[in-house]
Amino acid sequence: MRLAHRISPLLLALLAGPLSAVAQEAAPAQRPEVAAAAQKLQQPVVDWRRDFHAHPELSNREERTSAAVAKHLRALGLEPRTGIAHHGVTAVIKGGKPGPKLALRADMDALPVTEQTGLPFASKVTTTFNGQQTGVMHACGHDAHTAILLGVADALVAMRDDLPGEVMLVFQPSEEGAPGDEEGGASLMLKEGLFKDFRPDAMFGLHVFSSVQAGQIAVRGGPLMAASDRFSITVNGRQTHGSAPWNGVDPIAASADLISTAQTIVSRRTNISKLPAVVTFGAIHGGIRYNIIPDSVEMVGTIRTFDDGMREDILADLKNVAEHVAAAHGATAQANVPDQTGNPVTYNDPDLTARMLPSLQAVVGTDNVYEPPLQMGAEDFAYYAKEVPSMFFFVGSTSEGIDPATAPSNHSPEFLLDESSLDIGLRAILQVTLDYLEGGAPAAGA
């Protein structure tokens, strides 16, 4: 998906809001302490990222990664908490001056993808996933996020005496989703008391993104990434010989009709002039032989929305379509819509985003920060954003000379990270952190 490389009127409108005075102060400039720290940490961050890239671990299996993170935090003199949400790691950096509380998040897990980049540090890890042998790869850039936050930890510890406030570092497992019936990710970290003893006034996170050119940052206030729900539907018929379909009930024909009719949920029943929505069937399985009509067909898919009301309507419509279309064929449908708890909308606090926009501009220049369109992908950072005012932004990862519209996307076996994004990500997080802490948390109700 190509993103518009400009600041849209919507984001400019945000700057006319209550915090416009903050956003319109003197032309943004990168802090000298940020530049100095980034220069010093450039090679270590690259080295950490390459090490994590060569040793990827799937969701809820991030043992080596979390151990490496905890070891480094201890070496900095911090006291990391480990084992939260299985392999999560947190640590608090207490500044020498009073100030607000801030949380920073990086995710650590990889994907069941066989790498095809040809990099000298490419993953050679293999595993069994869902009963199939597969490679394991950091095909989404979480290795970069972990390395960047380790660099941020180094920089903040070095300037701790002059730091106003406190910063919680959150190294999160299982952003891609816990396997099977396991729990994991941001929701489990919160469930296990992430904010029990440290309630941040705000939280920041970033994601390297192939649809954004290296050297650019994309951010928008309000909804950024979609809510994600998974569904599973089983259509039950009656098995018979393929030469005599009238002697049974064909669940394949019923399923084909169901999938076709389900497309009208978005195209004919949902007001997509308000916000976009998606209903996608991702897998379907039924039958074992060319001349046997099977007993059942199983299918799974995803629903993406930006509005709670639209989400509830689509969930109800899909269940209704499944049951009634199946019945029209003489079959029955077991529709689990949704079949598990999905991610909510990733929502950037508009005031916080407007306030921090100059900080991002200070890192890459005003012309290189722009508002992207709504993203149909989902992020479990959304759970933190439901708890505290948050800002999540994209750091470009596709090298100059390569069109982001055609570059291998995140989750591709050919996903290729321009390592300059590590430096930009480090500078961006450090800049927004220091600017936020020195500016202080907004008063309640402001």
Image: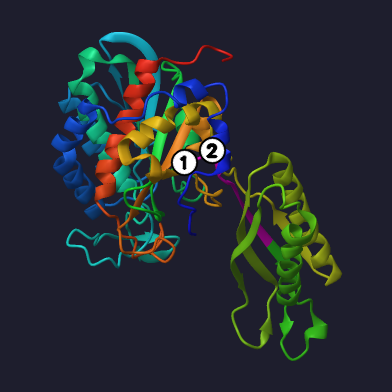
Q: What residue occupies the far bottom of the structure in this picture?
A: 243
| Residue pointed to by mark 2 | 11
Q: Quadrant of residue 410?
A: bottom left
Residues at badges 1 and 2 in contact (C-beta under 8 Å)? yes
Counting every numbered tag in the picture gives: 2
Determine whether, in the image, residue 63 is placed left or right of residue 239: left
x, y percentage for residue 218?
44, 44
Residue 169 at least partly seen = no
Residue drawn 76% across the image and 67% down it: 261
| Residue pointed to by mark 1 | 219
Q: What amino acid type is highlighted by mark number 2?
A: Leu
Q: What residue occupies the far top of the structure in this picture?
A: 98
Residue drawn 66% across the image and 49% down it: 338
Q: Quadrant of residue 269?
A: bottom right
x, y percentage for residue 322?
76, 61
Determine whether, in the image, residue 56 is placed left or right of residue 36: right
Question: Callout 1: helix, strand or loop?
Answer: loop
Magenta span dominant secondary structure: strand
Disc marking residue 289: none
Q: Which residues are magenta?
A: 220-233
Looking at the image, residue 243 lies above or below residue 96: below
